[in-house]
Image: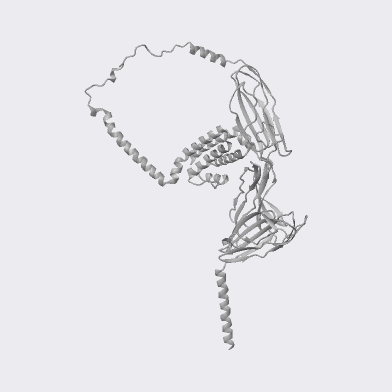
Amino acid sequence: MTGKIFGRAALCAWFLVVMASAVDAFGASITITPTVSANRISQDDRLTLTISVTGPDARKSGNPTLKPMPNFSIAGTFTSTEYQFINGKSSALKSYTYTLVPSKPGIFEVGGASVVVDGQTFISTPVKVEVVAGSAAPQSSQSSPSSGEKSGGSGNSDIFIRTTVDNKQPYVGQQITLTFELYNRLNLLGDTSYDPSSTTGFWAVDLPKLTPSTKTVDNRMYQYTAVKTALFPTMSGDLTIGPASLAYTSGGFFTAQQTRKLSTKPITIKVKPLPEEGKPSDFKGAVGNFTLSATADKKELKAGDVVTVTVTVSGEGNLDVLTAVTTPELSAFKTYDPKITPKLSTSGFTVGGSKVFEYMLMPKSPGVITLQPFSLSFFNPRDKKYHSLSTNPFTLRVTQGDASSAEQGSRVDRRNTVVKIGSDINFIKPDKSNLVSSNTKLYSNWFFYLFYIIPSAAFASLFIIKRRRDKLEQNTGLKRKLNAWKHAEKRLDHAARLLEKGDTHGFCTHVSEAVIEFIGDSLNLDPGGLTTGELENILCSHTVTPETAEHIRRTLELCDFARFSSAGTDNHIQEKLLDDAKSILTKLRETL
């Protein structure tokens, strides 16, 4: 009897195990957890709510449905996804972050949310938050974020990343420094994959690389790596620095390999416009702190000789957008386009350097000529004022040269020269060798054979042309590549016409399209969704030199800057864009 009871109990236990396995095998497996940045905040504070969806089936989940929170308004949202592969099994973590603004004091529930996966509904348990009037010292929640998340980044106590800026309220054209930081205590396998932040609306300059070091955070020692980038906003208003991401693989001899991807949070920059009060009439968009000097290679010369005046602008700021200084009246000289030599400096992680303008001037007549000062106006963000600089005037003594008398003598010689232009009587047939005998046969004339050859050749040419057109219609990539240059020329011609009409926005748009679409047609790809950094990487992978690819990226960024900045109306910038675009297309035509 006892044996039968024991057998039935064993059978029931086996049945329960099988049923539990079936549930695990066919039911979705996820966990949904809410966390808050603090359990107690003031009515003037912001609350960060994070809904975390984890588990093997988390990747199947959509956006969570939040339980109504009538006492809070949502000011912003952010979503991130991480994947793990451990012992051949995958797991996912989806984080949905909400910035909440309280409307009144009290104790409220937040974080009630639900997601549906494979027909099953998963519900989170809400978290209580106390909102008090006035100011209050926030109390961290029990499930506080990791060290990386506390600093606006992503990760855990073993590895995390974050991005920071040194100024969130700069002026247009003022440098801010973006820093990407990696803190790591793991044994990383192979190279990490770093995807930098998108910086649309900024002019970016790479700063010197930092030597890897160690840092201590929360009494833990980390291997520290940082990448710094100088950013210059090109327009006023709210600009967003996109998330940066890092993919890595970690593991060891006794631990399984894991592949994960971390992403930082975006950063909003509130860019202030340059003040209108006190703006000089010759201000062309220079922002920073500069000095201005000028020298002449000679003070005494003869008419017809050339004097070289060197104007140097030095200091801190984005000298790439400074294309010219204000020149004085030069009607007494024959002038040439200046030679511009930039020298970039990033010492101390501050962008600056110098830009030299060499003007070659030829006096038109002898005498004493005073060359008036060159000038430069700029805005200094440190004292929030405009400044105007001027060079000292030059006095040039020009004496009579030999060139003018020589030219005058040549005109006299030409005036006294007699040239024979023809004779009074012209013979009808001066050369008898051109006469043809009337006894010549038709078939002995080579025109007779051309009469048969030309139609045959024309038919063969038409046949070849038709086959070529049919081949082009079938091969879209080849057709795009063969027509790329023609389309680029049309866009540049249209841009030149818009430049004459003063349409700066249309001009910059067509110049940018000419370069980008030529690359897309030549490589048979759609460049519409690519950033300038991705476009630079693609070009480097297609035999384009890194210098040329960087030049293309900077030209496209200058197009964006000129399109939205007041400095874009400067004729020097517009002409430089058009010349650079023509030079770039010529190089790409030879390379691609």
User: x, y percentage for residue 475?
Assistant: 42, 46
User: Residue placed at 69% from the left, 28% from the top?
Assistant: 390
350 or 415: which is nearer to us? 415
User: Residue placed at 23% from the left, 24% from the top?
Assistant: 440
User: x, y percentage for residue 486?
Assistant: 46, 38
110 or 575: which is nearer to us? 110
User: Residue placed at 45% from the left, 43% from the top?
Assistant: 480
User: Residue placed at 62% from the left, 56% from the top?
Assistant: 79
User: x, y percentage for residue 208?
Assistant: 65, 44
Residue 207 image-quadrant placement: top right
- Can residue 55 be seen from the camera position used here? no
In the picture shown, does residue 447 fall above or below 157? Answer: above
Residue 308 image-quadrant placement: top right
Left or right, 137 with respect to 423, comes to right
Residue 391 image-quadrant placement: top right
- Can residue 299 be seen from the camera position used here? yes
Left or right, 366 with respect to 441, comes to right
Looking at the figure, which quarter contains the N terminus? bottom right
Extreme residue toward the bottom, this view: 1
